[in-house]
Image (spheres, grey):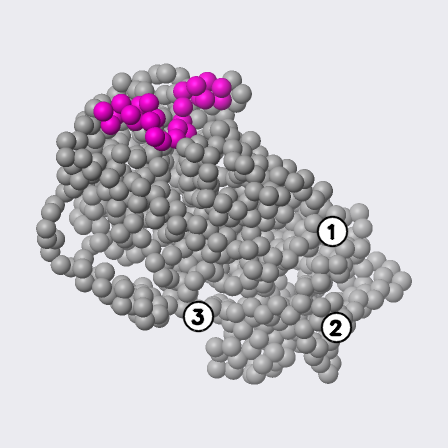
Amino acid sequence: MSQLLWRVRRLQTMGPREVAWRASRAGRSLLPRSGRGETTDSELLGTPEPDWDAALARFRECVGRPALLDRDRAADIARAHPAAVGQVIAAAERVACGRFSYFGHPEVTLPEPIDWHYDPLSKVGWPVVPASRINHRTADGDPKWIWELNRLQHLPWLAEAWLFTGEERFSDAAFRQLDSWIEQNPPGLGIGWRGAFEAGVRSISIAVALQGLRDSPGLTTTRFRAVVRLLAESARRCWDERSQFSSANNHLVGEMAGVATVAILLPELARAESWEKDAIRVLSAEAARQILPDGAGAEQSVGYQVFTSELLLTVAALLTLRDGRPPPELIAAVDRSADFIAALVGDRDPAPRYGDDDEGFALRLGAEPVRTVRDHLGTVAAVTRNASARRVGGTTLSGAWMNYARTEPVSGSEAVPEPGPRSFFAPDGGLVVLRAGARRLTMDVGPLGYLSLAAHGHADALAVTLSIDGEDVIGDPGTGSYYRHPDWRAAHRGTRAHATVCVDGLDQSVVGGPFLWTEHARVRVRSVDLERSVVDAEHSGYGRLSKPVVHRRWLIAPPDRGSVLVVDLIAGRGRHEVRTSWPLSPSLDVTPVGGGHLASRNGEPILQLVHAASTELIPYEVRGDARHGLGWWSYRLESREPSWLVGGCCAGEVPVAVATVLNPMDERGAWAEDLTLAVRDGSLAVRWRDGDALNRVTINCAIGTTAKNGDVVWNTLH
């Protein structure tokens, strides 16, 4: 995509105030710098005669600031968690030798001194020029990999290894790498300064690691001064260049968390008090915006919800360690999020995969390559004592460190949670969870994403997922790629890859760029009946067609029945192609059977899918199709593996209806067959047999919103 086309599409997502603000900022960036150059030490510390020796002494003694990484605590943690400590020491060994691995990429070894501008996977050296002149969207290299390296999130591992072992080789490696980074990356030059967000996230790791290294002989006054100057400049840029308007998503939270961390850990800075006050004010407001009232993440991505929550949690933990008074807005948001995620995963269900996930860490204190939602919940429980998080969270080294920042519980957060997982509807986030025994169904009835960009949302309105016995059966295909494989990016966020309906081969929403949607499908929830497990919702994403249609879906999953019925109605004008998709876990094999498919795992039948429509329907199956990007499953960013995508395809004059029976092959399951669907005078009639039972489901689609779904009747005759 050309830069001009991207800019035109990006402008379409902005309001007049944002356009004016961005024009003003762009204009200022073109003007020659005037006035003073670098901030002097006197200005930095707010004293006419700055004494860096005294400042370092106060830093070593933690005067006026909290301590997260601490030698006495390290000894206690090593006794309580020897395996996790061994893993982080091993991770520190690797990065001390220049061995790094990110996402699904293979490990690379970077020679000393590390070239922080070189991507060995792409074999691209990023230019050391003003960051504003680097166009990361059209460059040959992968900015995501080089950004990950330049976040320096491995430095806390080296600091921890120093505390756990007392071996100076770890502290020496940390200082050697930090020295070279400062030397190669003057403020504002290079890809590492491309955007305030990177500076913010990097600042958290540098500041926390520096504190863990405070008793190292290698922390000289000269070195301390250089690092403090770097952190102060990073905080200034994060505040002055913070994300606003349509860009104010997790990036704004990361920037403000960086400002707050620097201000809290370096109170000698002249601007520390105002930075902390301003950053906490913004974080408190964003906590309410980005963690919705029902606990769902506003970005429609569990991965980014966890990341945002941990940024808030890190700041709250530092404030608790300092004075025991974290902002209640931050703790409430973290607890709200934890309650939602815990209800979603229950005791054994797999983590949800909707939306993007770039495996982002706020602060890496454990050696785990990926932060699971249960790891996250365990860390939350350590700080807030949230009961839901305690019940389903895991034990990690991050949680062990954060346990020293225990807060006073928010009213009710420590109460014993309801026993066992349950069905629920999160109306703000737009997610329905239906449970029956070992079966968990979800249906996406939420917005595309957050703000006008919806940067990390996928075109998956009304998508359904199914897990059985704690294993994914029908799920989200994952993120795929950000920059390295544009074709993966397009396919994995597109409609056809998700468990919903695609009309005329088009996405429900209109793509404007890799992290930009210019037209959003809007979902209307007609009714949700948790008692009967019936969901009725529709979206208007295809209203933009020359012959517009609306996609309406019913998910019908009575708790006392083994089968699940999904009915899709495409209504409006004209003739259209209608295609259902059901992405299956890569652990499953697929066999076409009469009218549908049988999914099995290791030879054991798991799920039967039967398809029918009001017009002729042709079942299809695809696996590992590189040309169209279909039939793939991405567990980690920048990696994927073949998996089956099955469904049915038909075409005709609307209204067109499609029925899919999802028949788990458990002890209750009987073979489903003879599925038929008819459209009659404002109603849909579905029939099929399983064993000796005849199922008849009638849907009165002419009825408006009903609280109890009286328009859906399921009768079974034996």
Can I make out residue 631 in this image? no
Q: Compared with residue 541, is residue 118 higher up or lower down, i.e. above or below?
A: above
Q: Which residue is mark 3?
A: 519
Q: Compared with residue 520, is residue 40 higher up or lower down, i.e. above or below?
A: above
| Residue 376 x, y percent position in the rendering | 52, 39
Q: Nearer the viewer, residue 446 or 546?
A: 446
| Residue 499 x, y percent position in the rendering | 58, 60
Q: Quadrant of the N terminus?
A: bottom left
| Residue type at numbered disc 3 | Glu
The image quadrant of residue 349 is top right
Residue 436: assigned label = 1
Element under disc 3: strand
Q: Residue at x 35, y 16 (%)?
A: 167
| Residue 575 x, y percent position in the rendering | 56, 81
Task: Decide whether residue 411 is among the magenta residues.
Answer: no
Q: How far, Cα to Cα, is label 1 from label 3?
A: 36 Å
Q: How many marks?
A: 3
Residue 711: assigned label = 2
Q: Residue at x 17, y 40 (%)?
A: 43
Q: Neighbour class for label 1 at 10 Å: few (<14), some, many (≥20)?
A: some
Task: Decide whether residue 63 is among the magenta residues.
Answer: yes
Magenta span of residues:
54-77
| Residue type at numbered disc 1 | Ala
